[in-house]
Image (cartoon, grey):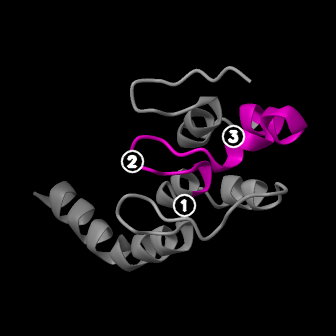
Amino acid sequence: MCELLDNKGRNALNAAVESGGWTAIGFFRKRPEFEDLINEKDEKENMPMHLAAINGDILTASQLAEVRGVVLNATNEEGYTPLDNVLLREKLRPCLDFAKQSFVNS
């Protein structure tokens, strides 16, 4: 299959996940010819599952987890798995909430 990449090395599925395009993600999930895209990495070695985790998109992550052949323990260039990204996001949430509140009150 011919694969088109954007300037960040993302294929169409990576871009759909990053933008929250649920319709496009559903399209890819239903077509076996696109199964290889599920584990394709971008230039930062993030797979679609990493991008969903980084964005905190639990619905997309759960949809991707159901795809046959998805690799859940792959690491990106930072050495993080998708689960690591979720845990890091949750650990940083209080700091981000505090920073947002401080910005609003200033």
Q: Earlier in the sequence, mark 2 or mark 3?
A: 3
Picture coordinates of residue 74, whole percent (x, y) = 56, 65
Query: Is residue 39 on the magenta stretch?
Result: yes
Structural crowding at the residue carrying mark 1, measured as other residues with C-alpha within 10 Å and reported as few (<14), some (14–19) or many (≥20): many
Q: Please name the residue that numbered disc 2 is placed on.
A: 44
- The one nearer the camera, 66 or 45, is 45
State the separation of the CA atoms marked 2 and 3: 16 Å
- The one nearer the camera, 25 or 81, is 81
Q: Amino acid at mark 1?
A: Ala
Q: Quadrant of residue 14?
A: top right
Q: Main secondary structure of the magenta part?
A: helix
Q: Residue at x 67, y 58 (%)?
A: 61
Q: Amino acid at mark 2?
A: Lys
What is the total number of numbered labels drawn onto the structure image?
A: 3
Query: Is residue 50 on the magenta stretch?
Result: no
Q: Please, what secondary structure does the residue beneath circle 2 have?
A: loop
Vertical arrangement, residue 58 with respect to residue 35, above or below:
below
The part of the chain drawn in magenta is: 23-49
